[in-house]
Image (cartoon, rainbow, N blue to C red):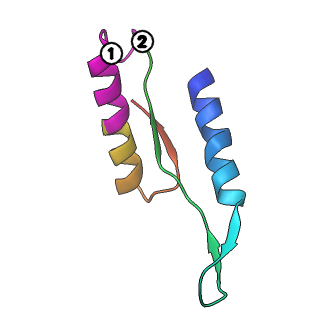
Amino acid sequence: EGALAVAERVREGVEAIRALDIAGDTVVGTVSVGASSYPAHATSALRLLESADAAMYRAKRAGKNRVISA
């Protein structure tokens, strides 16, 4: 739960960033995050990264700009 809360704050922070592109149009940042925890989602460092990576791709497929737990 702690990792998800931090990831959501990061996502909100990125979304709050406003920049101008070369044409002067406002661009909003987005981020898709996959979170996993030891030992709930994996028992090794490699599996932990793999499960977070898989969750991140699920977030992207679900519409991007979101946080999903493994």
Magenta residues (range) = 38-53
Q: Residue furthest front?
A: 22
Residue 16 image point, x, y percent: 72, 59
Q: Residues within 10 Å of mark 2 (few under 14, many from 20)?
A: few
- Please give the residue where the numbered disc 2 appears in the rendered image: 38
Q: Is residue 28 visible?
A: yes
Q: Amino acid at mark 2?
A: Tyr
Question: Who's the residue at 39% across and 54% down the image?
Answer: 60
**Which label was assigned to residue 45?**
1
Residue 56 image point, x, y percent: 39, 42
Does dot 1 land on a helix, a strand or a loop? helix
Q: Give the CA distance from mark 2 to mark 1.
A: 8 Å
Q: Is residue 44 left or right of residue 30?
A: left
Question: Who's the residue at 34% across and 27% down the image?
Answer: 49
**Which label was assigned to residue 36?**
none
Nearest to the eye among marks 2 and 1: give it.
1
Queried whether the magenta region covers residue 40, the answer comes back as yes
Q: Amino acid at mark 1?
A: Ala
Q: Is residue 1 visible?
A: no
Residue 41 image point, x, y percent: 36, 18
